[in-house]
Amino acid sequence: MEDGGKAPASLGTLRAVLAILQWWGFNVTVIIMNKWIFQKLDFKFPLTVSCVHFICSSIGAYIAIHVLKAKPLIEVEPEDRWKRIFPMSFVFCINIVLGNVSLRYIPVSFMQTIKSFTPATTVILQWLVWNKHFEWRIWASLVPIVGGILLTSVTELSFNIFGFCAAMVGCLATSTKTILAESLLHGYKFDSINTVYYMAPFATMILALPAMLLEGGGVINWFYTHDSIVSALIIILGSGVLAFCLNFSIFYVIHSTTAVTFNVAGNLKVRHDYILGHVAVAVLVSWLIFRNPISAMNAIGCGITLVGCTFYGYVRHLILQRQAAAPGSPGTAHANLSRNQMEMLPLVDDKQEKV
């Protein structure tokens, strides 16, 4: 009987690892493909690319829910769609657009390093706006992240102030979206597919007019001047399809990892390690493909940032372990987390920000 119990557990672990690797693949591929579109296809229109992603995600979510029946539709009151989901969609739209804008102007390696600044923006935002208080270890864990970002920025050979600002404001938008989700979406247990189902159409509506006004003329001119228009359009539309597949893979990751018998703290630590690995892989792959110059000090700054993110995840891990070991709460770590600690779960997780 004992061997029979180990086999399903091992199978569940393998399934979870494969699911996370699948998410890894989609995540890195979408980032690299977007950079390829901007740099190699000379399609320098981030608003239009984002709009294509939103449209593909809207169609994909509709097919997943109504045709494939992958998840049941979560009904939302019409009033809540405008009062709750629309504001979230607006922040969500800004977040994705700024990510693509930053890719338009700076290398993937630099952009991914800046995105690791998200934990710091989340802590600072909660402290300044929501008057949250955190223990000293949280603040200490942010020092190497901030220092690494500063060193990377100063030594970045392909530095662009517009791309840098877009990536930094994107971190702020990510933190804002994650924090607002708790207050705006309370009462609704959204999975990633339903989230895309409701938010992507709103995001398309928000972005369509600015994309046409600001980039419409350039897109039309690109159609007439680009050499291989058919293959280029296939790549652009393919990036939109892969962007939706990324969200679907997120749903599969969550479904798979919750089936594995890790405790809450262990789950978060494993997930955080995979996210850091994704950043490292994205940096390496982008360098191999685009050959953007990276100085020794720039690489050191990137390394310091990743070490800081690891330290941040370790601090989160210790806090969750301490909560799990609290008297009278064995095995119920998640239920005993304080509001502050729940908001402070590692946020370098791209699963909450990609479409």
Image (cartoon, rainbow, N blue to C red):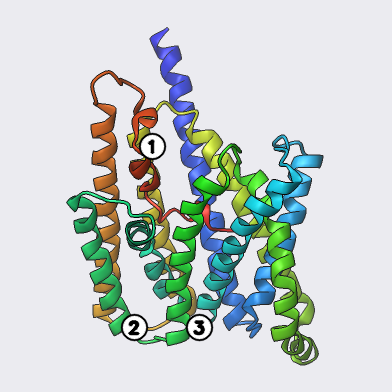
Decide if residue 291 is in sight here.
no
Dot placed on the residue nearer the N-terminal end, 3 or 2: 3
Q: Which residue position holds label 2?
A: 156
Q: Residue 343's x, y, as percent? A: 39, 46
Question: What x and y, as percent, mark residue 192?
Answer: 60, 46
Question: Crowdedness of circle 2 by 10 Å Cα count: few (<14), some, many (20+)?
Answer: many
Which quadrant does the N terminus fall into?
Answer: top left
Report, in whole angstroms, how far the alpha carbon at label 3 lies from the one at label 2. Answer: 13 Å
How many neighbours does mark 3 have within 10 angstroms: few (below 14), some (14-19), or many (20 or more)? many
Q: Is residue 242 left or right of residue 170?
A: right
Residue 105 marker: 3
Q: Position of residue 152 (x, y in %)?
A: 30, 77
In the picture, the disc for residue 267 is 1
Q: Is residue 223 above or below residue 130?
A: below
Side of 238 relative to 122 (left or right): right
Near-viewer residue (221 or 182): 182
Q: CA distance from mark 3 to mark 1?
A: 35 Å
Q: Amino acid at mark 1?
A: Asn
The one of 156 and 28 positioned closer to us in this rendering: 156
Q: Is residue 20 left or right of residue 208?
A: left
Sooner in the amino-acid sequence: mark 2 or mark 1: 2
SS type, badge 1? helix
Q: Say which amino acid is labelled 3.
A: Tyr
In the shown orientation, is residue 93 left or right of residue 9? right
Establish if 7 lies above or below 149: above
Q: Measured from the top left, where is residue 5 in percent x and y? A: 43, 15
| Residue depicted at 63% across the width and 51% down the height | 84
Q: Is residue 261 above or below residue 122?
A: above
Question: What amino acid is at disc 2?
Answer: Glu
Which residue shows up at 53% across the image and 57% down it?
353
Disc 2 secondary structure class: loop
